[in-house]
Amino acid sequence: GHSLDLFVVNSYGSAFQ
């Protein structure tokens, strides 16, 4: 729910892609 969460999700999302 926090901005930090989005940052983490983006990091993992890029790695998975």
Image: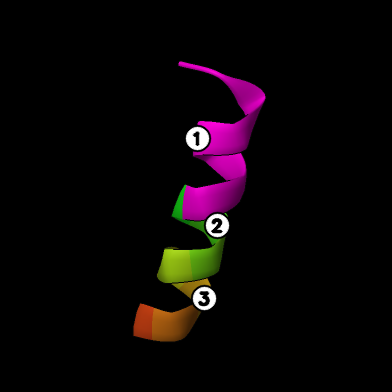
Badge 1 element: helix
Task: Give, as a three-letter code, the residue at label 1.
Answer: Asp
Residue furthest out toward the top: 1
Residues drawn in magenta: 1-8
Task: Give, as a three-letter code, the residue at label 3.
Answer: Ser
Which residue is located at x 61 percent, y 34 percent? 4
Q: Can residue 8 be seen in this view?
A: yes
Residue that numbered label 2 is attached to: 10
- Above or below, 14 relative to 1: below
Predominant SS of the magenta segment: helix
Residue that numbered label 1 is attached to: 5
Which residue is located at x 61 percent, y 47 percent? 7
Q: Quadrant of residue 2?
A: top right
**Disc marking residue 14:** 3
- Above or below, 6 relative to 2: below
Which residue is located at x 51 percent, y 75 percent? 14
The alpha-carbon separation of the residues under discs 1 and 2 comes to 9 Å
Task: Give, as a three-letter code, the residue at label 2.
Answer: Asn
Which residue is located at x 54 percent, y 66 percent? 11
- Above or below, 2 relative to 15: above
Badge 2 element: helix
Badge 3 element: helix
